[in-house]
């Protein structure tokens, strides 16, 4: 009986260790976006071109994704690997409708927030 209990306890410990050991990694470790950066992606699910930012950037239309497409009004997902919140705005002068990205967060589809293909300014706070 003691042997069965010991085996069951050991198996449970291994199961818990496996669950904890293979959980999701911190955003800073995400290979899709460098640490201490804010990344916008052209398409949902972090696909298409990628643009990396490390500071407030007005007029996103002046910047391009890694595939050459302009960033302004073309972003559909984001990863925020910064220790700071980031706000996206509808207009290049950082006015209009806005979207707030909490520090160390991600959003695989801006359409669920009504912000798909709208971002024109990025403010790091």
Image (spheres, rainbow, N blue to C red):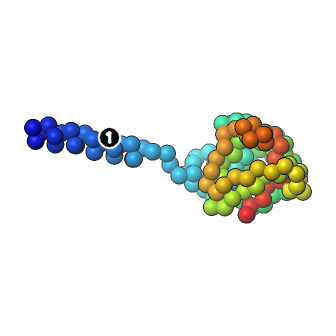
Q: Is residue 67 visible?
A: no
Residue 28, by quadrant, is bottom right
Q: Residue at x 66, y 40 (%)?
A: 108
Looking at the image, residue 104 sits to the left or right of residue 86; the answer is left
**In-front residue for pair 114/92:** 114
Q: Is residue 14 visible?
A: yes
Q: Is residue 103 above or below residue 20?
A: below
Q: Residue furthest bottom?
A: 125
Q: Picture coordinates of residue 69 (x, y %)? A: 82, 40
Give the number of marks. Answer: 1
Q: Is residue 111 above or below residue 37?
A: above
Q: Residue at x 69, y 46 (%)?
A: 78
Residue beneath label 1, please? Answer: 15
Give the position of the C terminus as an image quadrant.
bottom right
Report helix, strand or loop for mark 1: helix
Give the position of the N terminus as an image quadrant.
top left
């Amino acid at each position: 009986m003691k042997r069965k209990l010991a085996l069951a306890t050991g198996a449970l410990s291994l199961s818990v260790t496996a669950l904890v050991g293979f959980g999701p990694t911190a955003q800073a470790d995400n290979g899709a976006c460098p640490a201490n950066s804010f990344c916008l992606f052209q398409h949902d699910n972090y696909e298409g071109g990628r643009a990396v930012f490390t500071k407030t950037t007005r007029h996103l239309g002046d910047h391009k994704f890694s595939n050459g497409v302009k960033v302004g009004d073309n972003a559909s997902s984001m990863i925020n690997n910064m220790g700071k919140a980031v706000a996206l705005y509808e207009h290049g002068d950082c006015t209009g409708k806005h979207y707030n990205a909490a520090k160390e967060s991600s959003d695989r589809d801006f359409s669920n927030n009504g912000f798909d293909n709208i971002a024109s300014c990025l403010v790091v706070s």
